[in-house]
Amino acid sequence: MKPSVVLYKTLPDDLRTRLDAHFNVTAIDGLTPENLEKYADAFRSAEGILGAGGKVDASLLDKAPKLRAASTVSVGYDNFDVEALNQRGVILMHTPTVLTETVADTMMALVLASARRVVEVAERVKAGEWQRSIGPDWFGIDVHHKKLGILGMGRIGLALAQRAHFGFSMPILYNARKHHEEAEQRFDAQYCDLDTLLKESDFLCISLPLTEQTHHLIGRQQLAKMKPGAVLINAGRGPVIDEQALIAALKDGTLHAAGLDVFEQEPLPVDSELLKLPNVVALPHIGSATHETRYGMARDAVENLIAALTGTVDKNCVNPQVLR
Ligand SMILES: NC(=O)C1=CN([C@@H]2O[C@H](COP(=O)(O)OP(=O)(O)OC[C@H]3O[C@@H](n4cnc5c(N)ncnc54)[C@H](O)[C@@H]3O)[C@@H](O)[C@H]2O)C=CC1
Ligand SMILES: O=C(O)C(=O)CO
């Protein structure tokens, strides 16, 4: 008999067909409390789950006693209680690598848009304000040759460093849990502590995962240490930055601008102060959102679940210790 799985995200037709060939699939529209109750039988018999977003914690796992594998259509897995998965011997699969270059493109787009005020001035053109040659009130700041600080030199940080080094002649500084030899050799990136990164970066780009250690890692004190007129970019996870402290730093001119793809609350509430600030470029968590990359992530997530439940896991596993 085919293993039962709960699918909580819509897949492209061909990938859904592939999933159906391996599993008895119950498709639901998200891990909402209502769906957990409505599809209680499906969760009770599920050996796998596949989807994106929503909390997977002990209370959900208690409803799925047969679960052996969870496959997320994302690289970030801060919405999973990994400790609870480990205790129950559940493998967690994710989709690193396939999205790396696309997310780095998004970060570079945020760097350029924030520095050159692309969104703000384009809106002014649409509003009919371009009536004569523009003056300094439309100007931005240069990107090329400025110092780019990367907080979180992992897969995405490395791809961003490549763009900044070769494309924009930017010296690279970085902080991470350990030295990144490839970044140092290929892009001449210099490792430094967080304080130095804050003080010296013209552009501080965050590509960190959300963990207990990174939650509000950038708060009032850290923002106060940043170079006057610096630009802050975040495409890691929203809660890495204390959003109220960021709003204050943007209002009092400590920062020139911010380019944000992620927020403490998503979707960003429409009455957020951030949306009232002209020096904020706010994107709706589109880091990996291209047709090609979102397809690749869904494909990898399907293959990951097939490997975890019916084959051999040799990559993309968050907690390989469970397999031993
Ligand atoms: N905006 C978006 O759409 C997307 C956001 N992301 C976010 O980007 C994150 C990073 O992705 P990857 O580069 O693939 O992960 P990765 O695991 O390759 O890199 C993470 C880096 O952060 C560093 N790090 C972790 N904790 C740290 C700490 N306390 N202090 C300093 N450095 C620390 C690690 O040393 C590593 O260099 C994901 O976990 C996810 O949250 C990922 C994809 C898309
Ligand atoms: O993969 C992730 O972690 C995202 O945030 C969406 O691509």
Image (cartoon, grey):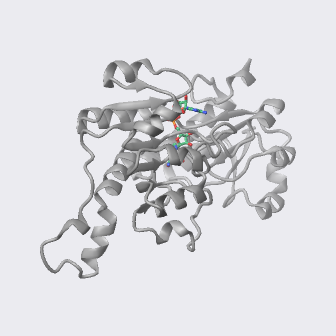
Residue 3: image x %, image y %? 74, 39
Residue 77: image x %, image y %? 64, 41
In this view of the protein, which residue sits in the foreground, 289 or 238? 238
Tell me: residue 123, above or below residue 109.
Answer: below
Can residue 311 be seen by looking at this rendering? yes
Tell me: residue 189, above or below residue 28.
Answer: above
Can residue 292 be seen by looking at this rendering? no
Tell me: residue 168, above or below residue 283.
Answer: above
View quadrant of ligand 1: top right
Q: Residue at the spot x=74%, y=60% of the render?
A: 32
Q: Image quadrant of residue 36?
A: bottom right
Q: Image quadrant of residue 159?
A: top left
In which quadrant of the rendered image does the N terminus lie?
top right
Say whether residue 162 is left or right of residue 97. left
In this view of the protein, which residue sits in the foreground, 220 or 119? 220
Residue 302: image x %, image y %? 57, 40
In which quadrant of the rendered image does the C terminus lie?
top right
Q: Residue at the spot x=66%, y=54% of the render?
A: 8
In this view of the protein, which residue sits in the foreground, 175 or 77? 175
In this view of the protein, which residue sits in the foreground, 293 or 170? 170
